[in-house]
Amino acid sequence: MSLPIKLTITPGRPLRGSYTLPGDKSLSHRSALFAAMAEGESCIENFLVAGVTRAMLEALTALGVAWHMDRNVLRVQGRGLSGWQPPRQGLDCGNSATTLRLLAGALAAAGIPAVLDGSAGLRRRPMGRIVEPLHQMGVPIEASPSGTAPLVLHHRPHSQPLSALNYTLPVSSAQVKSCLLLGALAATAPTTLSEPGPSRDHTERMLNAMGVLVESSHDNGAYLTRLVPPVRLKLEPLNMTLPGDMSAAAFLIVAALITPGSEVRLCNVGLNPTRTGLLEALGQMRAQIEIHPTGEQGGEPTGDLMVRYSTLQSTTVSGTMVVQMIDEFPAFALAAAFARGETIVSEAEELRFKESDRISVLVGELNKLGVQASENQDGFTIRGGRLPSAGQVEAHGDHRLAMALALAGLAGQGPVAICGAHIIAESFPEFPTVLRELGADIQDRPEA
């Protein structure tokens, strides 16, 4: 476990240069797991090496799947779901809800017994939203009495297929949708899922590339996903290079926008249209961002972004855009703090169920820095135009909150120190180093 680190950022320097982003976190999770479900060797380049993906890889080892990492190239010896072995002990998913929920779906299809557990933070995340529909499919799974981890899956014979599912998700969620699609691979007939908004579609794209028929459509305000299970559950191996992570790019984008004199080029960014809500929101704020498409990688559109310091204006965010930038709100909140006028976010109550209650802790920590931020039940309001003051804030065990708070020190009134900043290694270990290479004044040291 990493030692607690305090990160201190001092304003005064512009950010200049270019950076090629590490592989997308969502795609890294999926590619490792799906490669293990396939038959044969998969090769995944630009794989994200971080705390959250390490939990997935260690789970695959416990399931008897061999893999090898050489720098950021992952090779997985897929054994097919019928070749997985029951783990000898519980699978520790760390702080990663994506790991837990995707594994639950894959294990449901495999029919092998397992216990899925994780950190205290993960045990606060709601799991009833996958347990209930999995029950409807015939999966023998149990959650704790509070509807959270640990989850217990019991043995199901391969001769006993799962039932098809027609289900409406109460909240758009790529994690829940992906879990149910993976379980549906072992069903007897097509499964159809309906969502109120278009959650990210990485699972659908990747399964299609592996030979599974997954169709998406839009009907009367509902976003439908239909999976037709293969006659024989055999997935083709993956051979792909992962695009850069938009959620990681978000912090560097906002860093350049709010720091006077900055000009930063971000290369190989994933531009999946279900992930670009932040770019749309920042466009409404008059951000200077040039998008240069570079083609596709593994079925995912990519491009380079040229970002320049901008005088930002306030905006409002709600509805479909919330779903398309759900992980980027911590970074977006800092853009709002530096913008002129009042920015309002609504219909985003899902933020309360992330690594932390991101509405409450984000508002609370910004207030410590003199930012005029207020909490609403389903979002927050930020009145910008006044530079954040110097101060000390807390990461609350949330990697994205820690990185967002670091941005306040780039162009505020004085140094900002983030306690518990070691949590950044969960998703973007290079973040402090990258900012430093772009010109930022950053000091990191063990906490006293």
Image (cartoon, helix red, strand yellow):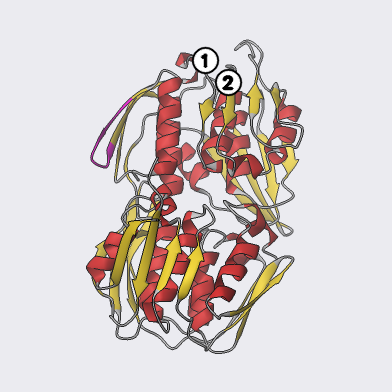
Would you say the residues marked 1 and 2 are in contact, meaning their CB atoms lie under 8 Å apart? yes
Residue lying at the far front of the rendered structure: 448
Of residues 57 and 409, the one drawn nearer to the viewer in this rendering:
409
Q: Quadrant of residue 66?
A: top left
Q: Which mark is residue 109?
A: none
331 sits left or right of 358 in the view? left
Q: Amino acid at mark 2?
A: Ala
Q: Secondary structure at mark 2?
A: strand
Question: Which sits earlier in the primary sequence, circle 1 or circle 2?
Answer: 1
Image quarter where the N terminus lies is: top left
Q: Which residue is mark 2?
A: 114
Residue 390 seen anywhere in this rendered image of the structure: yes
Q: CA distance from mark 1 to mark 2?
A: 7 Å
Q: Which residues are magenta?
A: 67-73
Q: Which residue is mark 1?
A: 86
Point out residue 352 in the picture as x, y percentages from the top left corner. 66, 57
Point out residue 47 in the picture as x, y percentages from the top left corner. 33, 43
Q: Amino acid at mark 1?
A: Pro
- Classified by dominant secondary structure, the portion drawn in magenta counts as strand
Image quarter where the C terminus lies is: bottom left
318 sits left or right of 415 in the view? right
Give the residue displayed 72% in from the left and 46% down from the top: 169
Q: Residues within 10 Å of mark 2 (few under 14, many from 20)?
A: many
Point out residue 23 in the picture as x, y percentages from the top left corner. 35, 50
Compared to 235, does 314 lie above or below? below
